[in-house]
Amino acid sequence: MNFALGIDTGGTFTDAVLLNAAREVVAASKSLTTRFDLAQGIAASLDGLPQNLLAQVDLVSLSTTLTTNSVVEGKGAPVCALLVGYDAHQIKTSGLADLIGLDAIESLAGGHDAGGLPLCALDEAACRAAIARHATRVSAFAISATFAVRNPAHEVQLRDWVQSICDVPVTCGHELASSLGAPRRALTATLNARMISHVKTLIDSVQRTLAARRIDAPLMLVKGDGSLINVASALLRPVSTVLSGPAASVLGACALSGVDNAIVADMGGTTTDIAVVRGGHPALSFDGAMVGNWRPMIEAVKVYAIGLGGDSEVRLQGGEGLTIGPRRVLPLSLLVHQHPQFLAVLERQQTEIPHASQMRFAQALSADSAHLGRLNDAERRAWERLCQGPVDLEAANMHDRDLARAVARLERKGLAIYTGFTPSDAAHVLGMSTHWSAPAAVCAARIWARQMRHMYGLGKWPLGDAQAPARDVVAKVTNTICQKLIEAGLNDAGQMNENNAGKVAALLTTMALGHNGRAADADAVDTAKPVFALQFAPDMPLVGVGAPAASYYPAVAQGLGVQLVVPPHAEVANAVGAVLGQVAQRVHITVTQPVRGTFKVFTPQGPQDLRTLPEALALARSLAGAQAQASALAAGASDVQLAFSQADNQVLNEIDGDVFFEATVTATAWGPPRRKIA
C-alpha cells in the first residue's frame, strides 16, 4: 500500500500525517516549529510517524502559514521595488512605503498606456544605476510597470538588466496578476519578492529532511486556492502560497468532518482563519483575499485571516483597552518549558515594582541571509549573543543598553522574537492547556496584571490573582472570534463593505453574547426581552480546527448559539488538507474593442489587433489554453483537463445594435499531482 505524507509548518507547531489510498488518517504527529532551523521541527514530526510506512510514501505535500504570518505581521526579507511609470499618488496608494519603506522604492520613467503603447522609452543608464544601488543589499527585486498586463515589455527588459547585474530573484507584476490596478499589482509583486527567501528556506528544510529518511517522492506545495504546485513553481510565485495554511485547513476540515455546508474556523499560533464552505467546497476570491491589512492580487480561498492566535501578544491599545494581536510573541510558558532557568526570573519579577522590561526576553527567530548581511557591528554582536540562547532584556537594559537596543532592531527586522503574555499562557493558567509550563504562565499573568494596573490603569484584578486576568483574556479571545464570525457572515452576504461590516459585527457581537450569556445563566433575571435574536443558519455548523479548537470554540459556539463540530484529528487538519488538492492553473487573456472594427488581444508578448471578434476570441482561447496546460504540466500535474469560461462586457441595444467593449477569456487546466512510480 502507498501513502501520502502531509506536512504543515505553522508559526508554533509543525504537523505531519500519513493518509492511505482511501484518504484516511493512518498516523499523525505534532512538534514545535523551530523557526531558527525549520528542519529540526520537520524531522521531529516525521519521527513521530511509523518509520516502516515512510518508505511507502509516493507523494509529499506541504502547507504553511509562514507566508500568511509574514504578511499579517509585516515581516519579510529586504527587497527593492522598481516602479516604472508610477506617479506619486500611485506609489502612495500602493502602500509600499509602509511595507518596505521609501528608501527601498525606485521610481523610473516608462510604462504603457491602456492600449499597450509605450509612454516613453526606458532610460537604460538610469535603470542600471537604480539596480546597482540595491544589488548587494536585497534578497530580491520586484518590478511593476503601469499597464504591464497590457504590454509587459518594460518589465521584461528591466528584469533582463537586473539579471545581468546581480544574481538575485526577480518578480514581475504581469506574471502574478492579470487585472488592472497598478498599485495593488506593485504590492503583490513586492510581497512575492519578500517571500522568496522564506519559501526557499522551507523547501530546502523539507527536502533535506526527506532525503535523510530516503523518502523519494514528488514534493508539492498548497496554493492559497487549495490547489497544488511543485517546488519549482512555488519558488517562482511564492505569493501564491499566501493563505496556503488556511486553504489546507478548510480542505482538511471538510474531509475530517464530513460536513458539506459549514463555517470553518482555524485558530493557530499567529492567525485565526475563517471560511464559508458550501457543497463541500470553499468559495474562491478572484479579486484577492484580505490578509491582515493587505489585499494582494492572488486567487485564493475566500478566507478572513486575522492576527489572533494562541501566541498573539496581549497588550493595551490606546483608546481600545485590552487588545490581542496582531504581533506574535513567544509565550512565557513555552520559553520556560524550553529554558527552565528563566522561571526564577519570573518568580522574582512578580513581586517587584512593575516596569516595561519585566517578563521580556528575546530569542533568535530567523537566520535570513539578506538581513544578516546588512547588520552593523552592534547588531551582529547582538545576533551572535542570541544564537547562544535567549536574552533577558531586563538585565540587558540595566547592564548593556547597547545590546538591548540592537536586539530591538533585530526584532523589527524579523530576526528575533520577544516573549509576552499570550492566550496560550492564559489557557495554561486556567488548566485549558497543559503541554507547557503552568508555573511560568501563572507568574506571567500576575506580572502582566500588575503592569496593566500600575502602568496603564487597566483592570481591577485582586493583587496576586492570576485566574481573573487569564479569564478576561480568554473572554476577549472568544469575543473577537465571535465578532469575526459575524463579520465573515456579513461579508459573505455581500451587502456591505469591510469597514461597515466590522462596525456592525462589533455591535451584533455585544448583543449576541450579552443575550446568550443571560440566557445561559440560571440565576439571571431577564428584565427586557430583546427585539432581535441573532441566529446563524441551522444547517451551517461551526467546524473548529487547529490546536486550540477544543479550548476556545465551545464558548464561541455557545455565545452565538451555533452547532459546533470538532472532528477527529482537528489539531492536524492543515496537514490532512495538504494532500487532498489537485494541481490547477488559470490563465486570463483580455480582448477589447478600442474603436469599432478593431479587436485587441492582450497576449503575453504584447497586444495583437484583429479585424473580427470571433478571430480575437479564438486567438485568446488558443493562447490561454496552451499557456494554462503548459503551466499545469510544469506545476506537476498529470492527466491534464482543460475548461474555458468567458466574462463579457457589452451592451445590447435595439436601436444601435450590440456594442462589444471587453471580454476576459479564462482557461483552467487541472489534474492530479504526479506521484512516485514504483
Image: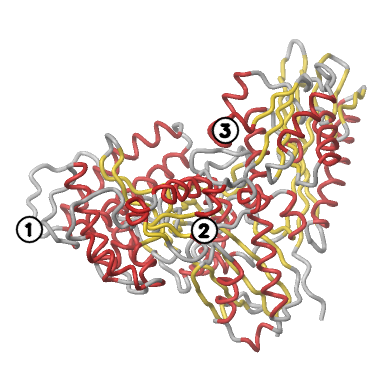
Q: Is residue 350 left or right of residue 271?
A: left
The percent coordinates of residue 16 (x first, y second) are: 57, 73
Q: Give the residue at mark 2.
A: 365
Q: Secondary structure at mark 1?
A: loop
**Mark toward the viewer: 3 or 1:** 3
Give the residue displayed 56% in from the left and 57% down from the top: 366
Q: Residue furthest front?
A: 399
Q: Is residue 609 left or right of residue 315?
A: right
| Quarter residue 580 falls in | bottom right
Q: Secondary structure at mark 2?
A: loop
Which quarter of the figure is the C terminus placed in? bottom right
- Sequence-wise first label, 2 or 3: 3
Q: Amino acid at mark 3?
A: Gly
The percent coordinates of residue 564 (x first, y second) are: 37, 62
Label 3 neighbourhood size at 10 Å, few (<14), some (14-19), many (20+)?
few
The percent coordinates of residue 1 (x first, y second) are: 70, 85
- Sequence-wise first label, 3 or 1: 3
The alpha-carbon separation of the residues under discs 2 and 3 comes to: 22 Å
The alpha-carbon separation of the residues under discs 3 and 1 comes to: 56 Å
The alpha-carbon separation of the residues under discs 2 and 1 comes to: 50 Å
Q: Secondary structure at mark 3?
A: loop
Give the residue displayed 74% in from the left and 10% down from the top: 655
Q: Amino acid at mark 1?
A: Asp
- Residue 324 against residue 542 in the figure, above or below: above
Q: Give the residue at mark 3.
A: 101
- The disc placed on residue 523 is 1
